[in-house]
Image (spheres, rainbow, N blue to C red):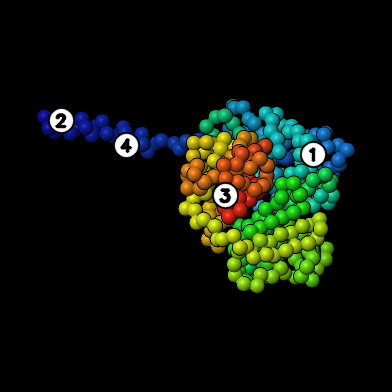
Amino acid sequence: MRKFSKILWVAFLLPLIWSCGEIAPPPIISQTTSSVLSTSPIVLTEDEAEESIAFEVSPADFGISTEVTYVLQMDRPGNDFAAPIDLGSNTSTTILVEVAELNRRAISKGIVAGETGNMEFRVKAVTPRNISDLFGAPASIAITTYADAVILRNLFLVGEATAPGWSNDNNNPALFRDPVNTDLYVYTGFFNPGGFKVLGRLGEWQPQYGTNDGSTIAVNDGGGSDPEVFTIPSAGIYTFTMDLDANTFSIEPFTDGAGTDFATVGIIGDATPGGWDGSTAMTKSTFDGNIWTITANLTPGELKFRANDAWTVNWGADTAISGIGTQDGPNIPVEEAGTYTIWFNSLDGSYILIQ
């Protein structure tokens, strides 16, 4: 009886063993990304500010029948789309982008107003099915911008007196721009003794701001000589102020204390990833414990800064993009969705959101 059972058991297993050897691998689904079809130079003019540019893109194929949404993204060259801007989307292969919007976005990404520079574009194809997004190859397009009534420059610290040293793309702290006088920049924080400069674009050495006479601002926009450094005499907390309209600067010792050493500071609000239910933690600078930063996806809505995951200490203001947050101040408006690098100073409440 035992011998018969063993024979039956072997007879049962043999087909399974044979069938395992014959199982074919699953088929590979072929997918095709979407790309921008034209890379011709784009010249933007203020007269056409309210008109739209039609970007034609190629169809994407997820390998299955599904609805596809095409999202046109832009970023500065060489940034590998680390902080892309979504310019527009459509379920068809024609994406419309308003001239004024493209002009503003190109300037914010580093093309000087009224000049020509390159931007990289790519297409993100999205489907409601549980399938990963498809990203097309980047395309470089030359864009000629026009001068907006208000130009929102972003400026960054560099130099031996600052956290990144002389690296031009090392999480360089942003200067805080006045929300009313957009030519006025202020940064209060710790400096080492030595020199520093101000850069207009991360990863590039021009525009570069410094001083040659110790009292006025000198700048190399890319066609001249680099200026000399601003100088910090000894380690400490200073307030550095630049007025680009008046072409003046000042460096003053900060005498109101070293600030509070908060364990955490985070962003909170319906514009943030955690909504109003919980803070999204920012990263404290190891160089200056009053400086906090985060790169986050925001949606239209509001946000505030708060310390230690509680409402005991929180900062708010009524100005979007940049401003001075005050204790229990109003919610900060976020008007446009996008990926933002946010800088916050818990010493004086200043903040700036950069796309």
The picture places residue 63, in percent across and down from the top left corner, at 58, 32
Question: Mark 2 or mark 3: which is in front?
Answer: 3
The amino acid beneath tag 3 is: Ile
Visible in this render: residue 45?
yes
Residue under pointer 1: 100
Residue under pointer 3: 294
Task: Name the N-terminal-most of marks 4 and 2.
Answer: 2
Task: Name the N-terminal-most of marks 4 and 3.
Answer: 4
Separation (CA) of disc 2 from disc 3: 71 Å
The amino acid beneath tag 4 is: Ile
Residue under pointer 2: 4
Task: Tell me: residue 211, above or below residue 123.
Answer: below
In the foreground, 90 or 206: 206
Task: Name the N-terminal-most of marks 2 and 1.
Answer: 2
Visible in this render: residue 134?
no
Task: Name the N-terminal-most of marks 1 and 3.
Answer: 1
The amino acid beneath tag 1 is: Ala
Task: Name the N-terminal-most of marks 4 and 1.
Answer: 4
Residue under pointer 4: 17
